[in-house]
Image (cartoon, rainbow, N blue to C red):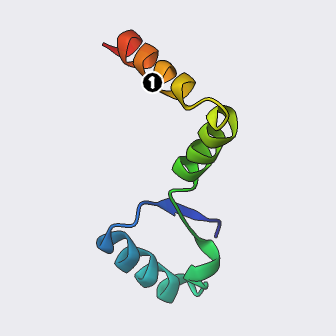
Amino acid sequence: MGYFIVDNADNNNTYINNLSVEFRFNPLYCYLCYIGHIINLVTYILLFSANLNALDKEEEDLDIVLH
């Protein structure tokens, strides 16, 4: 078994706990919550912490491209 990446919804906690019983693994070591989102937030902080206006501008530009 590898690792499980899920959000923190209660039903996902129940699902991982049930899988851990059936396949005999420790869910605390194989359960990653929002790791992609956390990495994204840390990256934004590192890139834009010196200039928060640049972050706002980047988000506005992204909204224009997506819509």
- Which quadrant of the rendered structure holds the N terminus? bottom right
Instruction: Give the total number of marks visible in the rendering.
Output: 1
Residue labelled with disc 1: 59
| Vertical relation: 60 (above or below) 46 | above
Q: Nearer the viewer, residue 61 or 11?
A: 61
Residue pictured at 56% horizontal, 52% vertical: 38
| Vertical relation: 47 (above or below) 63 | below
- Which quadrant of the rendered structure holds the C terminus? top left
Where residue 28 appears, as percent x and y from the top left, is: 59, 81
| Vertical relation: 35 (above or below) 11 | above
Where residue 14 appears, as percent x and y from the top left, is: 35, 79
- Describe residue 8's horizontal placement relative to residue 27 as left or right: left
Image quadrant in which you'd find residue 50 = top right
Q: Nearer the viewer, residue 51 or 16?
A: 51
Where residue 4 appears, as percent x and y from the top left, is: 54, 64
Image quadrant in which you'd find residue 12 = bottom left
| Vertical relation: 14 (above or below) 63 | below
Q: Secondary structure at mark 1?
A: helix
- Describe residue 63's horizontal placement relative to residue 6 as left or right: left
Q: Residues within 10 Å of mark 1 (few under 14, many from 20)?
A: few
Which residue type does callout 1 highlight? Glu
Residue pictured at 61% horizontal, 84% vertical: 25
Q: Nearer the viewer, residue 37 or 7?
A: 37
Residue pictured at 65% horizontal, 66% vertical: 2
Q: Nearer the viewer, residue 49 or 28?
A: 49
Where residue 62 appears, as percent x and y from the top left, is: 44, 18
